[in-house]
Image (tube, rainbow, N blue to C red):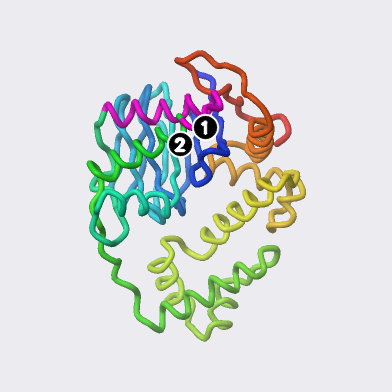
């Protein structure tokens, strides 16, 4: 399994979750966060990832678990890389399940970044399989069972993180808004600090405390999240690249793959395939298979 592949998709019956089925060998996920949870079942090989100051290792048969807005990476932990099936459920979907289970009020957080739970791993695979076969009732039911088990056995309610000082928090928020308002021509750090009435280094420190990334890295991730929304609506990758402030499509592709795991053309095609899936019956994949993976790189992304 030396050839990399990845398929990042959604299904109409699972409106609040993204799915990723992938095998990576050389691919490295840069530092990034998700606004969703990450529940990944490692099926072959080894994945390593930086997470909250340590390097975690998830081997075949284990799970990688990451909370929303938590900075992490991802890379091969062994020469052959790793294969996994991932669910990215929204915060709302997880907190809803937690409430149904009678959990204390608050946001559930994973107790550890790596866990072993054969049944949960099996459920993740069944969600992928049911969605791939367009079995809407089965997919939505299995997702509910998956989230319930994950919440019940692997989370606890986390308290709010200690916020930065009020002045720094306010400056960081205004700096973030300025960056989001002008993706094509962002200011320098000095210009950004002057615009919000702060000094550069204190602003940099407050921004990292508030958002987990320095301003330039946050801007890249925000550009990618904006590009994803454009691609979801059918925008071509080259047009999306210009719209979010990248020099060209090649720059979008490089950062998109580093954060999302697939090229923007493959991502867009998967979204269009989902629309076709919703319009009619899907092909009957074998019970022990997942939807056809799209090879990396995608020819539309050069």
Residues 17 and 281: in front is 281
Q: Which residues are magenta?
A: 118-137
> Which image quarter is the C terminus in?
top right
Q: Residue at x 25, y 36 (%)?
A: 115
Residue 116 visible in the current orientation: yes
Which percent across, then down, holds residue 121? 33, 29
Q: Residue furthest front?
A: 137
Q: Position of residue 150 (x, y in %)?
A: 30, 41
Q: Are marks 1 and 2 in contact (CB under 8 Å)?
A: yes
Left-right relation of 133 to 185: left
Q: Report how many numbered discs are placed on residues in the image.
A: 2
Residue that appears at 54% across and 42% down: 260
Q: Secondary structure at mark 2?
A: helix
112 over 102 or under it: above or below: above
Which label sits on residue 136?
Answer: 1
Q: Would you place residue 85 above or below residue 12 in this image? A: above
Mark 2 residue crowding within 10 angstroms, few (<14) / some (14–19) / many (20+): some
- Residue situated in front as seen by the camera: 51 or 236: 236
Viewer-closest of 298 and 229: 229
- Left-right relation of 180 to 250: left
């Amino acid at each position: 399994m030396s050839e990399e592949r990845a398929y990042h998709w959604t299904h109409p019956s699972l409106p609040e979750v993204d799915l990723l089925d992938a095998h990576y060998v050389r691919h490295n996920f840069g530092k990034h966060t998700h606004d969703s949870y990450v529940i990944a079942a490692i099926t072959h090989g080894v994945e390593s990832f930086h997470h909250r100051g340590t390097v975690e290792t998830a081997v075949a048969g284990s799970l990688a678990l990451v909370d929303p807005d938590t900075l992490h990476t991802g890379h091969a932990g062994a020469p052959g890389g790793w294969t996994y099936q991932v669910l990215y459920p929204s915060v709302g979907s997880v907190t809803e399940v937690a409430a149904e289970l009678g959990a204390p009020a608050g946001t559930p957080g994973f107790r550890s970044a790596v866990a072993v739970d054969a049944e949960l791993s099996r459920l993740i695979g069944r969600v992928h399989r049911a969605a791939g076969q367009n079995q809407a009732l089965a997919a939505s039911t299995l997702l509910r069972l998956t989230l319930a088990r994950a919440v019940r056995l692997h989370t606890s309610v986390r308290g709010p993180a200690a916020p930065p000082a009020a002045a720094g928090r306010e400056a960081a928020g205004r700096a973030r808004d300025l960056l989001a308002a002008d993706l094509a021509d962002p200011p320098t750090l000095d210009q950004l600090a002057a615009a919000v009435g702060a000094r550069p280094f204190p602003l940099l420190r407050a921004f990292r405390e508030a958002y987990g990334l320095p301003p330039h890295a946050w801007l890249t991730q925000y550009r990618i999240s904006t590009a994803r929304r454009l691609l979801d609506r059918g925008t071509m990758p080259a047009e999306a690249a210009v719209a979010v402030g990248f020099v060209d499509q090649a720059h979008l592709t490089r950062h998109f793959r580093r954060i999302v795991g697939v090229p923007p053309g493959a991502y867009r095609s998967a979204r269009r395939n989902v629309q076709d899936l919703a319009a009619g019956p899907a092909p009957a994949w074998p019970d022990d298979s997942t939807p056809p993976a799209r090879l990396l790189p995608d020819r539309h992304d050069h």
